[in-house]
Amino acid sequence: MNGRPVTIQDVAREAGVSTATVSRTLSKPSVVAKPTRQAVLRAVQKTGYQVNHLARNLRRQRTGSVIALAPNLANPFFSQILAGMSAVLSARNYGLLIADTQMGPDPDERLRRYLASGMADGLVLFDGGLSPAALDVPGRPPVVAACEWLAADLPSIRVDNAHGAALAVDHLAGLGHRRIGHVTGPRTNVLARARKAGWREAMARRGLPAPDAWLFEGDFSMDSGALAAERWAAAPDRPTALFFASDEMAVGFLGALRRIGAQAPRDVSVVGFDNIEVCAHLSPALTTIRQPRTLIGERAAFLLLELIAGGTGEGIEGLVEVELVVRDSTAPPV
């Protein structure tokens, strides 16, 4: 363009549309007809036009950033989800800020501070233990829950945790197990509650007993899985199979089994939940419930961007299916 900066007017002339159509195509392409959208994008490419995102954010009073709040960022479960979010956000020129809700004595207060800080245009929550009351912040930005949530009216992307538990129980019962225990997540965590309820419902549906003695409390960590191994070994009528509310607990359990002279699946069959990367590389490789974590992150980002733009997000499917991945840690009872 003769050495001068390319403007939105140049793009509009090249595409044969108005500047408003160019702006709408670049900010919210889903509302623009496909032929028009393609013409604008060809014009952008031909002219070399670049959006001044800083100026646009200032005009709109936006930061161009999104915050993801997760409990225990050391947990490998979140890596693929955050990667999925980042891919979607970066394509829309949004930055992703990541924070740990457990860094400090009061996670709810930490959430309130982020909502009131003006640091981001929206938040995605991965912590099912936070209180819905923490969202009661005047003028807060849009929030998406990427997990089951106690507040039913909060937009969310979630998996069917109860169905995942049922898949685990059905698999173990199909192998011939009747004494199927459960290693739970934290009592206050809504995901853990849903998986526990799903275990109870699946056991009842099959006419199998589910006494409290077959419940072993955990907190999603490897250490709590190792402690569950000690309690399982000491139980007088111990289960022949265990469904874990997280893979990390199952990993800790399998390691502790060796130290007490037992092994899976000879002495106990083990099913996890999440399908983190290490599951396929354990010995035995862990049977688990797979969550499509990249897809969860992508959908959470798409939903939040839609809400930031003033939409409702109704066209984005909120429920993500889980599936059973059978490996070597389960077998018929001896």
Image (spheres, helix red, strand yellow):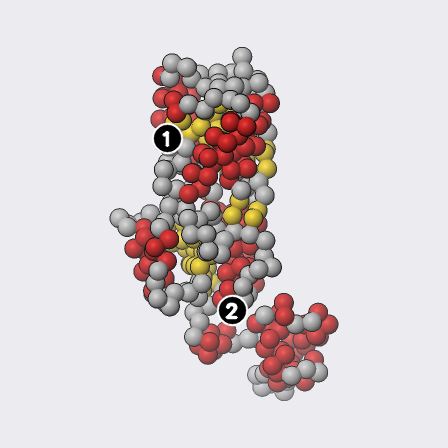
Q: Residues within 10 Å of mark 1 (few under 14, many from 20)?
A: some
Depth check: give the residue in front, 179 or 74: 179
Kindly identify which numbered label has been placed on residue 217.
1
What's the residue type where badge 2 is placed? Gly
Q: CA distance from mark 1 to mark 2?
A: 42 Å
Residue beneath the point at 33% across and 59% down: 112
- Asked which secondary structure carries label 2, the reply is loop
Residue that lies at the very extreme toward the right in this rendered image: 35
Residue beneath the point at 51% across and 40% down: 161
Depth check: give the residue in front, 47 or 300: 300
Write down the residue under mark 2. Answer: 310
Q: Residues within 10 Å of mark 2 (few under 14, many from 20)?
A: few
Image vertical order of residue 208 relative to residue 29, above or below: above
Dots 1, 2 in contact, CB < 8 A: no
Residue 258 at what x, y percent from top left? 43, 20
What's the residue type where badge 1 is placed? Glu
- Asked which secondary structure carries label 1, the reply is loop
Kindly identify which numbered label has been placed on residue 63.
none
Residue that lies at the very extreme toward the left in this rendered image: 105
Residue beneath the point at 28% across and 50% down: 106
Q: Is residue 255 visible?
A: no
Which image quarter is the C terminus in?
Answer: top right
